[in-house]
Amino acid sequence: MASILTGDKEYFKGVGQIKYEGPESDNPLAYRWYDENRVVAGKTLKEHLKFATAYWHSFVGSGADPFGGQTHVFPWDEKSDVIERAKDKMDAAFEFFTKIGFPYYCFHDVDVVDYGNDINENDRRLQALVEYAKEKQAASGIKLLWGTANLFSHKRYMNGASTNPDFHVLAHGAAQVKSALDATIALGGENYVFWGGREGYMSLLNTDMHREIEHFAKFLHAAKDYARKQGFKGNFFIEPKPCEPTKHQYDYDAATVLGFLQKYDLMNDFKLNLEVNHATLAGHTFQHEMQVAADNGLLGSLDANRGDAQNGWDTDQFPNDINEVTEYMLVLLQSGGLQGGGVNFDAKIRRNSTDPADLFYAHIGGADVFARALIIADNILQKSDYKKIRAERYASYDSGKGKEFEEGKLTLEDLRAYAIEAGEPAVISGKQEYLENLVNRYI
Ligand code: XUL
Ligand code: CO
C-alpha cells in the first residue's frame, strides 16, 4: 500500500483502521469506550483527552532491560543511511498514528533521528525530518502535542544537562534545546516539555545544589525567551519525577515544581506535565499530583501510564485500572480540564510483547480506560450525591464565624472565644467507604 502516510511499505500488516464498536464488541482491535465524537460534559472525548502517541516507547524502545538486550526488532530500523532510516521510522509512526486514530503525537529530538556529536550536523538531520513530518502531518491531520530534547541519554549528560557542574555541557544542552524548539515551532507543536532526568544529583558530597538549581532556572528563562522571540505561543511544561535516573531529581513532584516556578518567576509560561508512575515514585497518588497542579493553575498535560505495586521503579505500563483512572477524571472534570495539553501514553509494551498488534492492544486498552473513566466521572458528578457530600463537609465555613475566618477577619483570640462558646465539636464521619462504594457503583 503506497501512500504519503505509509511510504512504500505497510509496517503494521493485518491491522486496519481501529474503530469504535461499543462495549458489546468482542473485537480486540476495536474501541469499546473511546467513541471520539461522544459528547461528555460539553466536549467530545477527543477534545477532552487529546490522546497522543509517544514516539520513543512505540518506535524506538527496543525491549531491552538491565539483564538483556533487544527483543523488539523493528523493520523500520534496517537502512544504514541515517536519514533514510529515520524516514522509514516516521512512515511507520504515521501509519500507526493514523490506524490508532489519535489526533496527536509527542517526540524527543533523538527519537526522530539519530544524533552524533556534531551540533550543525544534528541540526541538519532534525531539520530534514521536520520537513518530512510537515508533509505527513498535512496529509494525515495529525498534530504535535509537544516536542522535547533528550538531555539524559548521551554520556556528556551523565552529571546533568542544565545542572551540570561543567558549563561546557550546559551549553551543549542549550544547543540541543534550541533545535528541538525550532523543530517544535516549525511543526506547529502546541507545547514544549522539559523533563530533567539527570537534573539532580547522586551524592551531595560532590554537589552544590543551590548553584545547580539557579543554573536550571537561568537555562529555562533563556529557552523560554528564545522560543517567545520565535513566536511560540504554546505552553512550556515541566514534568516532575522524584528520582531515576538520578537518586534525587530537582523536579521532585508537583508541589516542589510549584515552589520553584514561583521563586524563579516562571509561573506565566510554565505548567506541569504530570506522569502517573512519577507520582507513585514520589509517594503520591496521581490524583494528588493533579489536584496540586489544578489548585495552582498548572494542570497542563498528562503522561498516562502506571507503575507496578510490587516494583519500585518506573515500569511505564499502559493504564488499565478503571477505579484509579476514574479518580483522575474526577479531578480533571472538576478543575475545568487540561490547559493546553492532552493525554500522552508515555507507556511501553512489555519486553515479551513482540507481535506488531501488541502496540495496538496497548493503546486501545489505554484509550478505552480513560474514555470510560471520563464518562463514569461525569455520571458521578451529574447524578450522585458526591458533590453534595464534599460540600457539606466544609459547610461550617459557609456562614457565621467560619465564614469570617475564611475572610481573614478572626484573630487567634477570636478563635479561642468561639471554641469556648461552641463547646466540644461533634464527631463527624469522613464517609470514605461510602464514597469508595459510590465510585464503584457508577463503574
Ligand atoms: C521519563 C519520561 C520522559 C519524559 C519526556 O520518565 O517520562 O519520557 O516524558 O522526556
Ligand atoms: Co513522561
Image (spheres, helix red, strand yellow):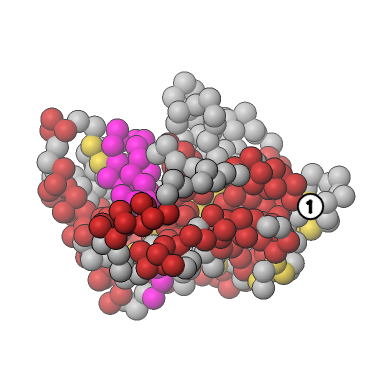
Q: Position of residue 431 (x, y in %)?
A: 60, 44
- Asked whether 55 falls inside the magenta stretch, the response is no
Q: Position of residue 174 (x, y in %)?
A: 24, 57
Q: Position of residue 327 (x, y in %)?
A: 59, 49
In the depicted structure, whether residue 94 falls above or below residue 305: below
Query: From which residue to which does the magenta span run?
Result: 233-256
Q: What secondary structure do most residues of the magenta stretch adopt? A: loop
Q: Quadrant of the N terminus?
A: bottom right
> Which residue position holds label 1?
32
In the depicted structure, whether residue 415 falls above or below residue 433: below
Determine whether the residue tagged by mark 1 lies in a helix, strand or loop. Answer: loop
**What type is the residue that disc 1 sits on?**
Arg
Q: In the picture, residue 294 is in which quadrant?
A: bottom left
| Residue occupying the point 45% across, 31% down | 313
Q: Is residue 416 left or right of residue 396?
A: left
Q: Is residue 198 left or right of residue 427?
A: left
| Residue occupying the point 54% across, 46% down | 428
| Residue occupying the point 21% across, 61% down | 264
